[in-house]
Image (cartoon, grey):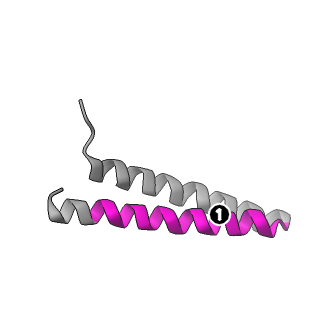
Amino acid sequence: MNEHPSLKNRAEGKFHQATGKIKEVTGRLIGNKELEYEGKKEKLLGKIQDKVGKTEDTLGL
C-alpha cells in the first residue's frame, strides 16, 4: 500500500519541526549556538515541507 505523497510530506514536516524545536531549545539551554541554529533551520525546513504537503492536498496531487 503506497502512502499518499502529501501525507508523507506533512508527517515528515511535523517530525522535522518537532526535532528542530528540541535541538533549538537544547542548544539554547546548554549554550551551543551551532545546535540552536541547526534546530531553527530544521524547524523551518519542516514548516516548508508541511506547507508543500498541504499545497499538494489542495491541488489534489
Residue 42 pos. (x, y %):
58, 62
Point out residue 6 in the picture as x, y percentages from the top left corner.
28, 53
The kind of residue on which mark 1 rests is Gly
Image side of residue 20 versus residue 36, left or right? left
Question: Which residue bears the numbered disc 1?
Answer: 39
Which part of the image, by quadrant, shows the C terminus? Answer: bottom left
Residue 43 falls within the magenta-colored stretch:
yes
Q: Quadrant of residue 14?
A: bottom left
Residue 3 position by quadrant: top left
Which portion, as a residue range, is magenta? 31-54
Question: Mark 1: which secondary structure?
Answer: helix
Pointer 1 local density, CA inside 10 Å: few below 14, some 14–19, many at least 20: many
Does the magenta portion include 47?
Answer: yes
For image coordinates 80% across by 65% down, the residue present is 29
Q: Residue at x 50, y 65 (%)?
A: 45
Q: Is residue 41 left or right of residue 49?
A: right
